[in-house]
Structures are given as structure tokens and as C-alpha cells.
Image (cartoon, coloured by chain):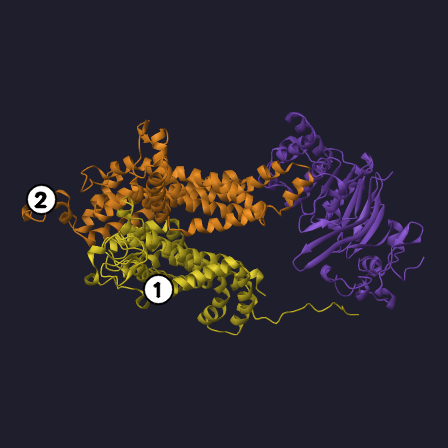
Chain colours: A orange, B yellow, C purple
Amino acid sequence: MIVYIIRRLMQAALVMVVMSVLVFAGIYLIGDPVLMMISPDASELEREAVRKALHLDLPMWQQYLLFVNDALHGNFGKSFLAGQPAMGLIFERFPATLELAFASLVLSLAIGLPLGVYAGLRPHTAGSKTIMTGSILGFSLPNFWVGLMLIMVFAVLLPDLVPGWPRLPASGRGATVDVLGVKLSFLTGDGLLHLLLPAVTLSLYKGALIVRLARATAREVLPMDYVKFARAKGLSERRIVGVHVLKNIMIPIATVSGLEFGQTVAFAVVTETIFSWPGVGKLLIDSILLLDRPVVVAYLVIIVFFFVALNLVVDLLYSVLDPRVRLESRAT
Amino acid sequence: MTVALEPVAAKPQTPFQRIVSDFCENRLAVFGLVLVVLSIFVAAAAPLISTQNPFDIAGLDLLDAKSPPGTMSSDGKITYWLGTDGQARDMMSAIFYGMRISLFVGFVSVLAALAIGVVVGLVAAYAGGRTDAFLMRIVDIMLSFPAILVALILLSVLGKGIDKVLIALILVQWAYFARAARGAALVERNKEYVEAATCLALPPWRIVFRHMLPNCMPSLIVIATITLARAIALEATLSFLGVGVPVTQPSLGMLISNGFEFLLSGSYWISFFPGVALAIAIIGINLAGDHLRDVLNPRNLR
Amino acid sequence: MTTLSVRNLRTHFFTKEGVAKAVDGVDFDVAPGEILGLVGESGSGKTVTGFSILGLIDPPGRIVEGSSIRFNGEELTAARPERLRAIRGSEIAMIFQDPMMTLNPVLRVDTQMIETVQAHLKVSEADARDRARKALVQVGIPSPDERLRAYPHQFSGGMRQRVAIAIALLHKPKLIVADEPTTALDVTIQGQILFEVQRLCRESGTAMIWVTHDLAVVAGLADRIAVMYAGRIVETGRTADVIERPMHPYTKGLIGSVPSQNTRGHKLAQIPGMTPSLLRLPRGCAFKARCPIAIDQCNEMPALEEHRPGHWARCWRATG
């Protein structure tokens, strides 16, 4: 098990090095950040000064080594635009993204799991067919467009047309509460309202996925002998579905939810842009569009780290849920 | 004494006929197919059915900017059935042309990714050993990152342009096909016909492409439909974020993005209708693909 | 007083391709402490018969109107689902074929046993655990406390089947339906389990229906045998009578195809052909196409008749 974790961590380190080189090289090649930062009529001397200050005058490999050296000290350089350390900027924004991603995870599980299990238990009812068709819509509708339409309906049209209809906020985080130095929105009413539309948008795709997965697994588990045996033991339907079936369904659901959590964080890029949610996704887009190299690279390194850690956690979670795997991994 | 079972009422049907008739049994799937055909028709016939060339800036009359749906143009020649955008482009014509770009990008990227992925997957499956391990490690790494992030980073390096979007989409998609092709090929590899072909001393490429590939096709076709829907959505998302197609060649995602700024002021149609068009294409593909998976399921193939 | 009395049991499956009459008019009785061997090949309806008794037939299958299953005088086909649930696991228990599949892989053995106790009795968890432990001891599982905390995959196949039997015995049922419980096991373990089951039934007076395709197994175990073919009982009687003096050509074929000392060096007899599809049963006797002694009369369905005292057969050519 420990060997396995070490091997995974080494793989991860390799992936991170490769990614950072690629990105660093790519961004170096396409544009001159200095041109974006100072006014076009600045003198050549001023430019040279900025270049030097940012080490842009050094050869590429030296810049990269500088960057690696800094990275090992948790320092990814300063944002060209904000002048703040890039790492700090990202850590400052990460909680907002995580909060959004968690909210959408909770939402998609709360809605997707019961619907999917129902559709698996009663596959031939009209309700199940509606759920399944609805799930196709859920992962077909372009996510960003759904976000726009939600804004249009709940922040513009309904409040305009229906007197007294509450206007849902469509931008920003709203009021936040500091918990151990981390700002959280969901603890205030205003923050919850601000969280609502982006979280719904982000949970749509994932919820549809969970519906389909829960249904497919339920259909797989139900004809199993152990379900029939549970019925032969005289257990109530509630216990059979709630314990025997659900516990088996939860294994793939937990695995996929965990892996999909990374997708959700990634997709938050889109949602945050639409709802001006001040998370890392919006920061990334802004940095990409403005060639703010240190921020992009810092984001990448952190997100790669995040993904590798997430995959590990999911693997461990899987082994906790499935006793069969637990034994095997202990043996190796 | 032999068995005198009544002969099973066999329908003389080729596998293809069976697939077609099975497919048509599901009305939702047929509806999906109709949506797909409609989208393709609109894209292909865009120059013929559009009332206006949306790329011809000179032909636009800024007085007509942001006209709501159903307005007559100020010169009284055409009706803007779906309204106009901020530059007075007829939305309907823009959507037809936008569909052209969206579908083009989707189909080309999926076909290229399919070709690359199949070659990689089949080579990995046939060669086995270290080659297999090496190729699949790359695939695993590719698949462990969300497509949108990889594409976003690639495009931030490559810059804007349809060709760049194509490269990014191909790079994030080939791994799906590689994994699927390898999986299917590994199953086929152990079957007798491959052994028979090996005994006949047929060259490896011939065994792989003439014998194994056709048997992997059903699963690859299903994945291709799902990937096509995803590719179209991904291109739209990238263009929406401003790193996809250039302003001069607006895809549906770009059109939606253009309408974003007018949304809060109530000019909903500029984002709404391109989104509907996009949704129609993607839903159509997914509805048809969803049922295609059941129909092409090897367990149903005889 | 019989424990179970099945009359004209018909369980049909209403599929897209047609109605499959898996069980089509089956009658038998089981007395307390008696072991009935229900023998037939796959598709003969023996397993569906077993599930019908417990009311565990899933759609598209159902027990057809006119069937009767009387258990201790109570008509089960008319019982409410809640009543059936209360009977299942407490008064009628079932043991399944494949012990690898009958225990839920993600739940510990104690969970699966305790829930069975608590499904029928209002007892504390500690009492339920104690009962579970005793049941494990009863079926010969060493160090039961440790085994209770284990997951099913930590047991061997034979051990799992013992656990399943222990679960079946938790409430001292009056009837156990055992669906080929030993076919998935090694021969040595098969023998142990057979011995245990026989002992437990004798001690507690539990009636048992032992469903199997293996005539050799029931020959040493059952008091009476009923042979099923294509959804019907074709021959039934005391075990010794059926084995030694079979009347139906199908039973004769089954016995002839069991290898034994006497058959060494000889070609084993076999029944030609295969079981007809339940969707397209021929008119008359379902076995006629495979029967070496079929006559024109076989186009009519023969009735199950008592040709010798207590020995019944469904064949025109059966003789006393």
C-alpha cells in the first residue's frame, strides 16, 4: 500500500514537471507580456527595466530554472498584473471555487441519486422514462448556455414580469463569513442566494451523470442473488433497497463523484466566468487572456497537484467502501 | 431419434437491417436522428437558405442592430425572424453559418481523433508488453485531466483559430478512442478468427486492420457519437470563453458569447437562439447515440 | 397433516416472445420432517417452483389464477405481501444455489444475520447477535465470534454455504426450500453439507424441498422424489421405488445416464436431444420427441396416475 502511494506520487511529480515545462515554453513563445503591461509609448529604457525586473531578459532555460527554484519554495513569482505573489492569489481564490464545486456536488447527489435509484427500481414507468430523457437533456444542454438562461429567467425576466418575484443575484459571492481565515458564502442568507444559480448550473451535468450511473448500477444489482436472498430472508423492501442495494450502488457513485469532482472544479472556469464568481477559474481565464504567465503556471501546478491528490483520495475511498478491494490492497 | 423441434420462425434479415429496424423502434431515437439531419442540412445549405451573408460587414445596416425577433429590416427587404445582434447581423443567418462551423469542427476533430486513437489502441493491443504499457500510460495521463482544462491551456499557448481549435480538440479526444479500441481489440485478439489469421501467416497490419478493426467498430461508433456531442459542446465553451474561434468566423458558442453582454438589458434573443440551435444539434446526437448503444450492443448482434 | 400442499401450481412468464409456462400444473405434498427431492434438468421448472412457494416470482412472471399453495393450512397465493414477507425467512426459508452470490459482498456476516433475526423478532441487537452465533455453531463453523465480524469474501465457498444455511435456520423454519445448494461446491464439502442438512432436518422436524438436477444426490438424501420435465411432474414416489423401478422413460434416461460401477466399460446411456423451448411446447407429452418408446397416443397429454401404490407417473406406457 505504501509502495503504491509512493509510486503514485512519483508519477504525479513527473506529470507535474512535464506539464510545467510545456506550459512555460508555450506561454514564453506566443507573446511578450511586457507589451501588455506598459503603455505603447513607454521608452525602450523603461521596457528594458521591466524586462530585467521580471527576468525576461534571461534565456528561456534560465527563466525556467528560476521558476522551478521558486516553485520548490512555494513561490511562483509575482503576477505581472496584480503585483502579488501568484501562489497567494490562487490560494486566496481557491476556497470560492471549492465552495461552488462542493455545493454543486451536494446538489447533484441529492437530486441525482434518488431519481436514478427510482428509475432503476421501476424502469418501465412513465416517470422513469421521463427521468432518463431528462438526464439526456441534462448532459446535452451546453452548460454555459444553461447558466445564461438561468440568469435571464431568474434575474431578469421573472422579476420583471411577475410582481413580487424575488430577483436572484447573478454575480459575485454576496456576503461572506470568515471561518478560520477562509471566506465562506453558504453561511449567510445572501451568500446562499448568490450560490444558488451558479451551483445549479454546475450541478446539471453531474446530476444527469449520477442519475444514469445510479440507474445502471441499480439495474445491475437488483437481479443479483443476494438481493433475492435478502427477500427470501423476509427483509422489508425498505431495508433491501436502503441497505443491500444502496450500499452496492454507492461504490461506483462515490468513485465517479470523486473523480468528477475534479471535472467540476475544472468546469467551474465556465460557471465562474458567467456568474463573476471570484474563484480560481475566473482568475485563470483572465490570466490566460492577459498573458499573466506566473498565475497560469502556478494555477497549473496546483491543479495538477490537486488532481493527483484527488485520484489518490478516491482510490482510498473506494477501498474503504468495498471490502473486497480492502483486503487485496492490504496484501500487496 | 433426433429432436423434432419446430423450426424457429427466422426472419431473413442482415445485421444491418436488424440494426435499422431496431433503431426505428424507439421514437425518441428517431426524433434525435431527425434533429441531427436537420442540423446538418442547415449547416450544409447555409449560403442558400440564409437571407443575408453575416460575414459581409458592409451589407449590415447598423440602424437594425438589436432588433427583436420578427422585425422588418429598415430597407424593408427582409424580416429578421430571430432578431439581430449588436452589429445588426440577422441571427437566423448567423446561426446557419455558425452551425456550419460548429459541426465542421465537431466532425473533423472526432474523425481525426478516431483515426489516431484507433491506430494507437490497436497497435497497443496487438503489440502488448512494453509498447502497450507505455501507450496506455500516456492515455491514462491524458484522461486524468479534464478535457476543458487541457484544451484551454493548449489554446492559450496556440492562440485563436479554427485550425488551433481542431488541434486542441483532437489532442484531448484521441485518448478515449485509443482506450476503447484497445479494449475491444484485446477481446477480439483472443478469438479464434485472429488465431486462424495468424496461422495463415497474414501480415500483422492486415490482421489488425482487416480482421480486428471491423469487429471493434460497434463500440467505436457509439463512442464517436458521444464524443461528437462533447466536441461540439467543448468548442462552443472554448469560443464562449474567448479562446476558440476568431471573431471573423463565429461558431454557435461565439454567437452566444456575443449575446451575453446584452442579456441583462433584455435582448435575450442574441444568446437564446444560438443556444437553442446548439442544444438541438447536441441533443439530437445524444438521443440517437444513446439508443444506438443499445442497438449495437454486441450481445444483441447475432 | 402436511406442511406444504401444492395443487395445480402454474407459474407463467409473460414475455414479448410469448407466454413461457415454466411451471404448468404441479401437485405435491411435503410432510413435517420429510425431504422431497425435486429433480429435473435446467428449464424443467424446478427452481421456479421453489421460488413460487416463497412468493419470489418477479415480473414478467406470475403465479396464474387457480394455483394453490397451502402452507400449514394457509393459502399463500391469496396472502398479502406483508404476510408473505413475515413468513419468508421465519417459517419458510430458502438456501440458494451459488454461495458465492447469496451473501451481500459489502455487508459483514453479522449485519446480514442480525437483520434476519430482527426482521421477524423484536429483540435487541445483542440478543440477535447471540442467536446468530448459535446458528453458526449449529452448522459447524469454528470461532463464530470472529467469523461474524468478517466479510463474505473472507470465507470459502463451503463456509459461505454454511453461513447461508445458518441464516435459513435462524428462525427454526417449518420448511426449507434448498435450490441446488451443493452443486457449486467440491464433492467432499458437498457430502459434509448433505450430512449436516439431513441431521438438522431430522432433529428439528423441518420439512425440506431439495431442488436439484443431480439424481445421485437426492437418492441418498430424499424420502420422496418428484421428477419434473417441461413444467410438469412426470413421475413421483418414494425414493427407493423411483430409483429402482422408474416408470417414466425420462426418469429411466436420467438414471441410465448416471455413471456407476455397473456401467463401467459400457457406453453410458444418454437422453437424445434437448429440453424443448417453454415458449413452443409441442402438443401432448412434452417428452415424446426424445422418447424411445413414443406412440401416437403421446400426442395427447397423459395424466399423472398412480400405477403402483404411492408411485405415480405421467406416461401412457407406464405400467404397474
**Is residue C266 visible in the rendered structure shown here?**
no
Location of residue A177 by image quarter: top left
Please tell me whether mark 2 or mark 1 is closer to you in this view: 1
Horizontal relation, residue A167 to residue C1: left or right:
left
Q: Which mark is residue C98?
A: none
Secondary structure type for disc 1:
helix
Q: Is C268 in front, or is C89?
A: C89
Horizontal relation, residue C129 to residue B143: left or right:
right
Query: How many residues crowd around disc 1 within 10 Å: few (fewer than 14), some, or many (20 or more)?
Result: many
**Residue at x 64%, y 33% (from the top left corner):** C115
As shown in the figure, which amino acid type bears the numbered disc 2? Ala
Q: Which residue is mark 1?
A: B43
As shown in the figure, which amino acid type bears the numbered disc 1? Ala
Q: Indicate the position of residue B261 as horizontal and vertical percent values.
A: 26, 47
Chain at tag 1? B
Horizontal relation, residue C52 to residue B27: left or right:
right
Q: Indicate the position of residue A238 as horizontal and vertical percent values.
A: 61, 36
Chain at tag 2? A
Query: How many residues crowd around disc 2 within 10 Å: few (fewer than 14), some, or many (20 or more)?
Result: few
Q: Which residue is mark 2?
A: A49
Task: Give the residue at the far front of this rendering.
Answer: B76
Q: CA distance from mark 2 to mark 1?
A: 52 Å
Q: Is A22 in front, or is A204?
A: A204
Q: Is B120 in front, or is B237?
A: B237
**Residue at x 7%, y 45% (from the top left corner):** A46
Q: Quadrant of the C terminus of chain B?
A: bottom right
Q: Indicate the position of residue B158 as horizontal and vertical percent values.
A: 25, 56
Q: Indicate the position of residue B228 as horizontal and vertical percent values.
A: 40, 59
